[in-house]
Image (cartoon, rainbow, N blue to C red):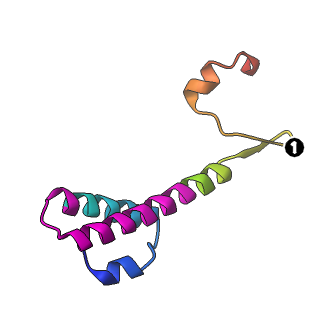
Amino acid sequence: MAKSRAANPPKDYESALAEIEAIVAEMESGQLPLDASLAAYKRGAELLNYCRLQLADAEQQVKVMENGTLQNFRTDSSAQNDPTDD
């Protein structure tokens, strides 16, 4: 794993996810020495945290205004199970 990659923050969620996938593939190859494996694991943990924060932020942004009150976004399946929508 290149040290420059570990020093750079991801530019977006998709980039972070792609980097996580590359790290997993690298680690699964079994070709990394111990110190590189530890660095890859640390970078993967940082990227995972970044992705979780991005998803939480996106969830907040998906809330919609309805009749002056802020309500959570509902998926089609949750809307079908809600009898108050009739």
Q: Position of residue 28 (x, y in %)?
A: 18, 56
* Quadrant in which the N terminus appears: bottom left
What stretch of residues is rendered in magenta? 26-54
Instruction: Tell me where residue 41 sits by quadrant.
Output: bottom left
22 versus 52 height, above or below: below
Instruction: Count the marks.
Output: 1
Task: Name the residue at the bottom extreme.
Answer: 4
Q: On the picture, is 70 further left or further right than 61? A: right
Q: Residues within 10 Å of mark 1 (few under 14, many from 20)?
A: few
Q: Residue at x 85, y 39 (%)?
A: 67
Reply yes or no: does residue 16 show up in magenta. no
24 to 74, vertically: above or below: below
- Please name whichever residue, 54 or 70, is drawn nearer the observer in this view of the structure: 54
Element type at marker 1?
loop
Q: Residue lying farthest right?
A: 68
Camera-side residue of 47 and 35: 35
Which residue matches tag 1?
68
Would you say the magenta stretch is mainly helix, strand or loop? Answer: helix
Q: Nearer the viewer, residue 17 or 68?
A: 17
Q: Is residue 1 left or right of residue 48?
A: left
